[in-house]
Structure formats: C-alpha cells, structure tokens
C-alpha cells in the first residue's frame, strides 16, 4: 500500500494536519506558528506530554536563529541547529501522526520535505515502588510502572550487556499500543522469537483494551478452556531480568505495570524471587513448601469429602476429623457456598476503602466464622479446611495458577459428591491431563523437565543450588 508523503509547503501540511487531527475540536492538541530564520514554521504537540521548561528553551533558540544561519534542509538542521539528543526525520504521514499522538514534538518548516520529530515527551507516572502482590522478604523494593520507558530502564539497570535487545512493536489499529520484546540476542531461541514477532504483527484488533490480557489472548488462541496459565506475569524487574538471562523473552506492554514472560512452564510459574534471595537451604525449603501447599490446596477438601462418604477408610487415630455436629446442609453444598463466599470477600476487599477495611474484615470474620457455624449453616470442620485453602492460595504469586487449582478443585468436589471414589479418581486424572496436555506459547512441554524427562534440570527446578562460580 502506497504511503502518503508530506509536502514542502507548510500551508498544505497544516491544512492536512488540522483536518486529520481535528485541532479545532481537541483542546489538548496544540499547534503554534512561529518564524525560524526568516521561514514560516509550525509545531504540533499534545498538551501535558511535553516538558514546558525544555520547550521554552527550544523556542528561544529557534527564534534566535538568523536568516543567514538557517539550514537549507531538514537533515542539515537536525545535524547542526537542534540542541537536543533525540531527533528524528519523517515524511510519511502515518508515522508523523503516530509520533504526534504519542506525545512527540513535531516541527514543520516551510520548504523542508521532512518533519523534525523531537522526543521531549514526559508521561504522568507513579514512583517505582515495590508491587503489592510480588513482595519479597529480602531483595530489591522497586517495581514496574505503567510507563514503558521506565520499565526498560529498570531492566537495563540490571543487565549492562550489549547483547540485551529492546525491540519495539505496535498492535491495535486505533490504540497503536507499544509492545517491547526484551531478550538476550545470544541466548534466545530465534525461531520462537521470529514466530512471536510474526504473531504480534498479524494481530487484527482495534485496540488492546485490556493491555496484557488482550495481547495474551491474541497470541495464544488454542485450548482457551484450559485454565492453567500460558504466561508468567511479574511486576518485579529483578525477576524479569533473571528470566531474560535464562534465554526467555519478556514482553512489556505500555500502560501495564507488569511483564509477560514466555515461554513459561508450570515450574517457572511456581518459582518466586524469595527462592534466590535466601541461602540455598532456605530457598529450597521455601520452594518445596510452596509446591506442597499448592498440592494440599487441591486435595484437602475433596479428600475430606470422600472420607466423609467412606468413614471406614479413615486411618486409625484420625477419627477426630469426622464431622461431630449434625449436618443440616450436605457437605458438597457447604464447600461450594464457601468457595463462592471467599471470592465474594476477596472482591469486596478490593473495592473497600482503606479506612473501612479493618472493621469490615472483623465483621466478615465474625459473621462467616462463629455465627455461621452456630446458626447451623456450616460445620466447623468445613470452615476449618476452607479457611486453610483460602489462606494457602496466597502462597502463590500467580493469580492465574491459584484460580486454575480452584476450578479443578471445584470439579473434584462435584465429581466426588456424585460418583464417589470413581469421581475422585476421574477428577485427579483430569487435573493431570490438563497440566500435561497444556503447551507453552512456543509449543514445548508445559511440564518440562518431567516430560520429556531430564533429571538434572528437574533437580534444579526443585532444589536451590549455589550460584555457578561460588567457592566451596
């Protein structure tokens, strides 16, 4: 498709831009006509994106240029008469309008066949404080923010290598969302990298309205019904940098304070930064305990339900786990109601003002705790096991993994209540198949190094070893 080029006539360029950008309607799109070295010129920018002090100095410099000092071309002016670092030349209207809408300062000079694009933009941004979800007991306390340039700088700060690549792409016909692929050129799988870039270039959507989730759904369209996550999300630049050094690709999306890591196996998702900020023994304990707790959150309530159906299977000495009070509501309905109630409390906590969070938490604990048991709605044993499951879910940094286990646990509860032991077995088989048949975005095994089996890599996934080069 042939691209439309700008004219050397300033009036024609202004007429085109004023109409295309609807300058008369959009109050925040500002243009100003000035005179530079005896030539008419016009600048366009987005109010709020440009640095006022810098623009004031640039204007003063432009107005001080004498007619005999005025360069004859845009290329010459960019080399000799622009006291700024980031300057680009474009004559394609699509690219020019894209940069203007991104906040770049555009300068048109009568007689020049190219537009001077001065990247003096600044975005409203919050501080790079520690993320609320990916907190660590020890380690750095900075986190990604919504401004993509800040995020790339946080990674560059940790990887000072010329092999690190930051490749910019765009997606969305209207939003033109910036997407950055971060990878080590000598360590990345270039076949997968090329496939990923091709998939992003082929995305046909009007806008990435949900940022990373929209991008993830566009990149991975098959097996959408499998709840286990296909990407690892992190708001920690140290975690993202570590994955880049291991040969993975980190995807940054503008306006999103987290990074997508691909390809990702289930072992990658379970890992956390605390595993590496502590000595090997402590890191191994934290990692194995997280694996064990994840397994318990799935098996605890369905196993209890199965044992209540088959009391004769309860081992000797564990008879105390039996329900002692009368059961007014079947156990399966108690478990399902509490699964829904816990999510309701979680959503309420997100939307509760901070000043009310403590009293409402106390009220919820009383109502759903002691009063619900005393009223006969729930049995104390059911409340105990569901409380463990609800709290244990927060040991996982990945929301997607905790909800995947939740969905599979609910399926197990329902099948166990209907079909007994055979339903329990079928649900466990379904869980194994859901994990084993899931594929990473690169098409590799989701449970590597279990399948295909690699003992050395599996040992590294389960145990925290000393760093290479450490002295014995």
Image (tube, rainbow, N blue to C red):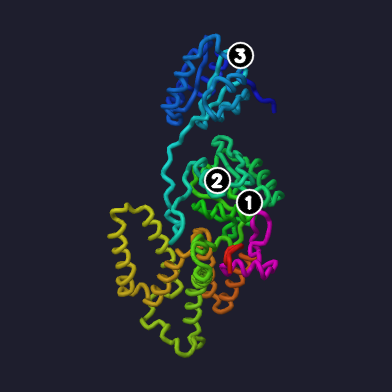
Q: Callout 3 environment at 10 Å: few (<14), some (14 to 19), or many (20+)? A: few
* Residue projecting furthest to the front: 471
Front of the two marks 1 and 3: 3
Q: Residue at x 63, y 43 (%)?
A: 200
Helix, strand or loop under label 2: helix
**Mark 3 vs mark 2: which is more N-terminal?**
3
Helix, strand or loop under label 1: loop
Residue 156 is tagged as 2
Q: Which residue is mark 1?
A: 221
Q: Which residue is mark 3?
A: 72
Helix, strand or loop under label 3: loop
Front of the two marks 2 and 1: 2
Magenta segment's dominant SS is loop
- The quadrant where residue 95 appears: top right
Q: Residue at x 62, y 56 (%)?
A: 246
> How far, Cα to Cα, is label 2 from label 1?
32 Å
In front: 249, or 418?
249
> How far, Cα to Cα, is label 3 from label 2?
39 Å
| Whole-percent x, y for residue 431 in the image | 59, 68
| Magenta residue span | 437-465
| Direction from residue 211 to residue 358 in the image, left or right | left
In front: 72, or 424?
72
């Amino acid at each position: 498709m042939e691209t439309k080029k700008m004219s050397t006539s300033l009036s024609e360029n202004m007429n085109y831009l004023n109409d295309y950008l609807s300058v008369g309607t959009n109050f925040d799109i500002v243009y100003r006509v000035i005179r530079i070295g005896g030539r008419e010129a016009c600048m366009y920018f987005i109010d709020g994106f440009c640095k006022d002090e810098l623009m004031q100095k640039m204007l003063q410099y432009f107005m001080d240029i004498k007619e005999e000092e005025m360069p004859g071309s845009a290329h010459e002016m960019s080399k000799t008469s622009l006291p700024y670092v980031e300057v680009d030349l474009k004559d394609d209207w699509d690219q020019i309008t894209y940069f203007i809408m991104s906040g770049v300062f555009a300068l048109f000079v009568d007689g020049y066949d190219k537009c001077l694009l001065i990247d003096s933009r600044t975005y409203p941004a919050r501080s790079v404080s520690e993320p609320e979800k990916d907190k660590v007991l020890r380690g750095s306390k900075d986190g990604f923010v919504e401004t993509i340039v800040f995020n790339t700088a946080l990674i560059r700060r940790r990887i000072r290598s010329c092999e690190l690549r930051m490749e910019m792409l765009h997606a969305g016909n209207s939003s033109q969302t910036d997407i950055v692929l971060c990878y080590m050129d000598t360590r990345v799988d270039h076949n997968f990298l090329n496939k990923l870039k091709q998939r992003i270039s082929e995305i046909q959507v009007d806008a990435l309205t949900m940022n990373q989730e929209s991008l993830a759904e566009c990149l991975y369209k098959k097996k959408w019904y499998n709840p286990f996550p296909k990407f690892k999300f992190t708001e920690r630049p140290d975690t993202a940098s570590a994955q880049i050094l291991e040969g993975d690709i980190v995807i940054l999306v503008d306006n999103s304070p987290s990074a997508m890591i691909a390809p990702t196996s289930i072992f990658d998702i379970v890992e956390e930064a605390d595993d590496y900020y502590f000595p090997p023994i402590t890191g191994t304990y934290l990692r194995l305990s997280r694996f064990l707790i994840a397994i318990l959150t799935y098996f605890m309530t369905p196993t209890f339900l199965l044992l209540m159906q088959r009391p004769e299977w309860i081992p000797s000495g564990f008879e105390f786990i039996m329900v002692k009070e009368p059961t007014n509501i079947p156990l399966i309905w108690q478990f399902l109601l509490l699964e829904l109630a816990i999510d309701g409390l979680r959503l309420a906590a997100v939307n509760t003002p901070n000043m009310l969070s403590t009293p409402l938490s106390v009220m919820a604990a009383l109502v759903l705790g002691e009063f619900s048991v005393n009223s006969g709605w729930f049995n104390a044993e059911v409340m105990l096991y569901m409380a463990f499951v609800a709290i244990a879910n927060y040991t996982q940094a990945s929301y997607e993994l905790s909800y995947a286990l939740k969905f599979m646990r609910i399926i197990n509860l329902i099948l166990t209540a209907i079909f007994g032991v055979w339903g329990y077995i079928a649900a466990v088989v379904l869980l194994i198949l859901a994990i084993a048949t899931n594929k990473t975005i690169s098409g590799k095994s989701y449970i590597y190094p279990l399948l295909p089996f690699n003992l050395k890599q599996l040992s590294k996934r389960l145990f925290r070893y000393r760093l290479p080069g450490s002295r014995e």
